[in-house]
Structures are given as C-alpha cells and as structure tokens.
Image (tube, rainbow, N blue to C red):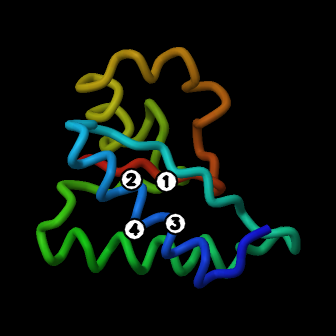
Amino acid sequence: MPTVEEAMIRLERELNYAKSAGVLLIRIIHGYGSSGVGGDIRRACQRFLKREKEKKRIKNVITGEQYSVSERSGQALLKQYPQLKQSRKTDRKNPGITFVEL
C-alpha cells in the first residue's frame, strides 16, 4: 500500500503520461479505505482532481458515487464512452473509483 504522498505522485505522473498519450478517459482505482468510511488516499485524490479541474488541466471528474445510469453525470459518461458498459455493473456507485476526462 502506498502512502498518500506516494499515491499522489503516482497519480500526477500517470495523468501527465495519459494526457501526452492522447488518452481521453481514465478510471482511477483509489479504494475506499479499509475502515469502510473512506480512506486518506481517496480523499487526497479527489481534492487533487478538483484542483486540477479548477485549473482547467482536466475536463471533468466523476466520482464512483456519481456513476450510475440513474445519475445525469453517469448517463453522459456512458453515452460518450459506450465501452464503459462492459464494467458498468461493478463500477456503478463504487466509492473506490473516480473517472477523469482529460
């Protein structure tokens, strides 16, 4: 298990790499925390991504909790990226993941 600092360094590096490679969407698996109430990496990841979106470095952030066919953001994501339908059952309302549109 990486520390929060290690995880954030890894996240920033992978986002930069994906963006330079022309990747449009990333599913980040940060976990939910072993205590069942949300982990430090999850919170740090979501704070970092929010700042990146505010700086216009990424287009959009959709948390796993927001990802569902009953949620507007989930519907839009599935429409734009139909390949996500393959994993929609396991990803739906999953607090351990976050989608990032580059």
Q: Amino acid at mark 2?
A: Ile
**In the image, residue 50 lies at what x, y percent?**
32, 74
Residue 59 sits in quarter: bottom left
Q: Residues within 10 Å of mark 2 (few under 14, many from 20)?
A: some
Instruction: Locate residue 1: give its quadrant.
Output: bottom right
Label 1 sits on residue: 98
- How far apart marks 1 and 3 lie (CA) works out to 15 Å
Mark 4 near mark 3, Cβ–Cβ under 8 Å? yes
Residue on which disc 3 sits: 10
Which residue is at the far left? 56
Horizontal placement of 86 versus 37: left or right? left
Q: Identify residue type, mark 3.
A: Arg
Q: Alpha carbon of mark 1 to alpha carbon of mark 4: how far?
A: 14 Å
| Residue at 65 percent of width and 55 percent of height | 96
Label 3 neighbourhood size at 10 Å, few (<14), some (14-19), many (20+)? few
CA gap between label 2 and label 3 equals 19 Å
Contact check, label 2 and label 1, Cβ < 8 Å:
yes
Q: Which residue is mark 2?
A: 62
* Mark 4: amino acid: Glu
Picture residue at 72% right of the left edge, 72% below the top:
2
Q: Secondary structure at mark 4?
A: helix
Q: Where does residue 63 sit, x and y in percent of width and height?
A: 47, 56
Question: Where 3 sits versus 17, above or below?
Answer: below
- The answer to whether residue 15 is left or right of residue 60 is right
- Which residue sits at x=59%, y=45%? 93
4 and 2 marks in contact (CB < 8 Å): no
